[in-house]
Each structure stands twice: as structure tokens, then as C-alpha cells.
Image: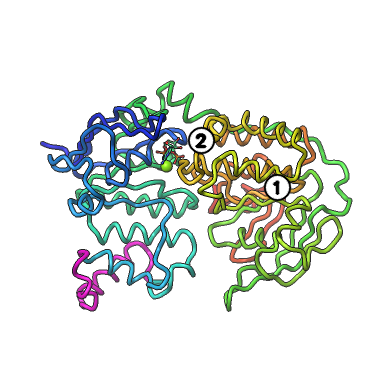
Amino acid sequence: MTALLDVKGLTKRFGGLVAVKDIGFKIEAGEILGLIGPNGSGKSTVMKCIMGIEKPNAGSVKLDGIDVAGWPTHRIARAGVGIVFQHARPLQRQTILEHIKLALLPDNLLMLATDHGVTRRAEEIAARVGLSQVMHRLPRTLPFADLRRLELAKAIARNPKVVLVDEPFAGLTSGEVADFSALIGSFRAEGHAVLLVDHNVKSVAALVDRVLAMYLGEYVAEGSAEEVMRNETVRRVYLGGKIETAARPEREGKDRTPLLDVRGLGVLYGKATALDDVSIHVGEGEFVSVVGLNGAGKTTLFNAISALVPYSGTINWRGETLAGRTPGSIARGGIVQCPESRELFGDMSVRENLDLGGQHFPVAEAAKQLDWLFGLFPILKARQGQAARTLSGGEQQMLAIARALMMRPKLLILDEPTLGLAPVILEQLSKALEVLRQTTDITVLLGEQNVTFALPHADRVYVIEHSRIIWEGDPARFAEEAGAGYL
Ligand SMILES: Nc1ncnc2c1ncn2[C@@H]1O[C@H](COP(=O)(O)OP(=O)(O)OP(=O)(O)O)[C@@H](O)[C@H]1O
Ligand SMILES: [Mg+2]
């Protein structure tokens, strides 16, 4: 029996960098192959080469026995390959249902868009991915997880034989991951061949039939999930160890004026309430985690603090109001936010992005800081000259965090820093935060739905749900009192 997808000797170079080197695998109909590896190991590049978004330098990509390597993307799509990107750019004027209808139609038959059969089928797909309630809304009004559902809905509508799914679980909560796993599992049940990339190791292992691990563009291991996760190289370069933190002494000055004091914060987006009477405070040197599901209001809270959205209520910084201050002046005053959306300058190099963060410091001080960050994220040192937009997903996340640290914040706000990072990098980041805590007076406000990362570091935890703070307390009490639904 010929495999539905048969990749041999796939190689892709970017200048002197070999991003993918002699990679091969087969996927049968009704099979899911997991592709794992640290950030920058070439996983997305493999998918882009199969899809024709990047032209491979060597190798064959056989689809049902026909070599499509080097074909243009639209022909490969028509031959039956579909990709679910991590970062979707939906059309802004089309509703969710219209997006699904467009995906249902072959590209030159758009006039059929009014066909009742098409509408009915699109509605069925919307229901299947859980978008029924919102199918007449525009993408920009929807939370992150729903946009990911839309991407899956489009893939279902196009009905490709081979589905490439890049990081579907990133930024999703455990409940959402379960829903998505079921949907991806249904691709298998319907006889599609699926290639799945994600850093959520547990969920990948639970879903796939086999796993292929790569590192620095090269093959490392292939086998059952269990076999591959036991492989020594995979453990060393990808999985890393457990996140551990040292016990912390009771903080001094606990009762002094908090560094940041947010009281009765309200934010409206049009008529929708994004934050309702939210009060939090962060003491000097404290590490505070705000835990909440997608859409709960974490990002809005951080954006209000950084003066990026209008709000009611008060925000005091070192005892003085932030009302009327511009985002730039707030950042210079020591509150630096590393946003979920990264906001990198894509056409500028890694180095230029970092230098921007350090521009307010004397040259020698900035150089020292840069050195320290390069020690923390060696890949950024190696890629100083590379344009930020061509970095892998996880590399971009590292750059965004490094740029924020480059500004030497007094208060560092990290919005979902774990998004798209390999386990081993999470462990490194975790260690770096520990070093920062113990050697500097940095204060951290962390927004996460990944509690395994958010809890170990935190002095104090807030839980935000539907625009309100519903719990505050010690991380040790979290599991008992607030953990349901997160752990
Ligand atoms: N256009 C490009 N020019 C230069 N280098 C590139 C380009 N595209 C990708 N790379 C590099 O190739 C390597 C592989 O990137 P790729 O996006 O495939 O990694 P990945 O395994 O998907 O990583 P992640 O898990 O972080 O998403 C990375 O180091 C990346 O910086
Ligand atoms: Mg990637």
C-alpha cells in the first residue's frame, strides 16, 4: 500500500543555515504523525515545504504516489494538502460563516456562494467545531480560541487528504485542548493523513500514532510516542527537566505602599464589558501571577496598565496616578510589557530589535545587558543578523521577552510568555526568572493560563474569570480552592 504522504530526503537551506536536512517519513491514510523538536528545529519549515510555501532544495514529497515537490502552493492545495497555521489572518469583513463557505468552494466557483446546500454544509461545520453561537460575527470580535476553531473549520471545509496542523494547542486551556484533540482525531477517523506539530507534549502523545523528533534540522528519533519521549537525545534537547523554584523568604516591606495599585478598573469594548471592578496590587520585588482562561481579561488588564486602552478606575504607580500618561512615558517610568502578540519589528534584525530596547542606557551598560541576554537565549546571539519575521515561532517569543528585559524594567509584565516555547526553553526561562528574582529587585506581573508555569514562581496568585477577579491567594492554596478547570 502506498502511503498517502511520502517524504524523502527533504532539505531546505536559508543562506548558510540548513533548516531541514534530509528528513523523510510516511503517513498512511487514517494516521496521525506527531513532529516534535525544540524551537527552530525546522518543523514549520517541513510543513511549508510540503505545502509549497517554501521550495525545498532537495527531496521528494509524494502525494498518493505523485511527486509534488516544487509545485506552486495552489496546485498542491488542489492536489489535496491543507495547512492549519498557528497565526491566522482572517478576512476582516467576512463573517465566520462566510469564511467557512469560501473554504467550501473551489476557487473559481465563487458565484455558488448563495447556494443553500453550501450554507447548510457551512453551518454543519460551524456546529462541529463549536462556532454555531458566533457564526454571524466578524473575526475581530472573537476570542483567540474561536479564531483557532475557524482555522480548523476551514480545513474541514476544504477537505484535504493530507492535513498539516502547526501548533493547534498553543495558548489554549486544557478544556479547549481536549476539544481540539477530538477534532483532529476526527480527521484520522475520516481517513485523512495528519502531520501534527505542537509543544504540548502530553496532548501530542495522547493523540498521535507515531512521533518523529528533529533537532537542528536533522532526524533524531522515530517511533511510538513513548519510545521517542524516552530517547536520551530527545530528553536532553527538547524535554528538559521539571520546573523547580527555591523556597522564598518572607518578603520585607510587605506592608509598604504597593508599587502598582489598581483599583476598581473597568474597561468596555463597545457595549461588551472586558473588565469589571478589577482591583489588584503588586508589591516591590513581588512575583504576581494572574491566571485565567482565554478571553477572561488578562491582556485587557495589562493593556490598561500600559495605557493602551481607555479605562475607568485608578491605576497608581509608586503612589502616583498613571492617568494621562502616554504608553511611552509609562514604559520609560519602568513598566515594561511583553505582549502576547510580540510586536516585534519584523523587517529589522534580531540585534536591531534588542538595541531598541537598550537605547536609553549608556552604551557599556546596554552591552552588558545584551551579553547577559545572549547567555540566556544563545540562539538569539547566533541569529543577530536575521530579520525578526523569519524567526521560528518560539524564537520570536524569546526575542520579545529578551527585548522587554533589555529595557531593565522595574515591573516586567509578561503576557502568556509560554506560548509556543519548547519544554526545555520553558525550563530555561523559569531558571532565568529565578535568577532575576534572587539577584535583582525586579517585580513581575505574569498573565498565564498555563498554571504549571505560573504557580511555582508566584508569591501571590489572582484568578480572573469573565472580566472579574474571583480569587486571590497563596499558590499553595490554589489547587484546593481555585484549581478546578486549570489543573
Ligand atoms: N526565511 C528564513 N530566513 C532565514 N532563516 C529562516 C527562515 N525561515 C526560517 N528560518 C530559520 O530556520 C530554522 C527553522 O525554523 P522553523 O520555523 O522551521 O522552526 P520550528 O521547528 O517550527 O520552531 P518553533 O517550534 O519555534 O516554531 C529557524 O532557526 C529559523 O530561524
Ligand atoms: Mg514553528
Q: State yes or no: residue 122 in magenta.
A: yes
Tell me the quarter of the picture where residue 405 sits.
top right
First along the sequence among labels 1 and 2 = 1
Q: Nearer the viewer, residue 397 or 145?
A: 397
Label 2 sits on what residue type? Answer: Pro
Q: Is residue 51 above or below residue 243?
A: below
Tell me the quarter of the picture where residue 241 sits.
top right
- In the structure shown, which secondary structural element does the residue marked by tag 1 occupy? strand
Bounds of the magenta segment: 106-132
Instruction: Please say which color scheme the image uses.
Output: rainbow
Q: Which residue is mark 1?
A: 412
Q: Mark number for residue 423? A: 2
Locate the N terminus by quadrant: top left
Q: Nearer the viewer, mark 1 or mark 2?
A: 1
Q: Mark number for residue 55? A: none
**Quadrant holding ligand 2?**
top left
- In the structure shown, which secondary structural element does the residue marked by tag 2 occupy? helix
Q: Are marks 1 and 2 in contact (CB under 8 Å)?
A: no
Q: State yes or no: residue 224 in magenta.
A: no
Q: Is residue 327 above or below residue 396?
A: below
On the rendered structure, is 417 left or right of 5?
Answer: right
Given the current orientation, which residue lies at the most extreme top position? 232
Residue 440, position as x, y percentages in the image: 78, 36
Residue 294, position as x, y percentages in the image: 53, 58
Residue 26, position as x, y percentages in the image: 22, 35
Q: Residues within 10 Å of mark 2 (few under 14, many from 20)?
A: many
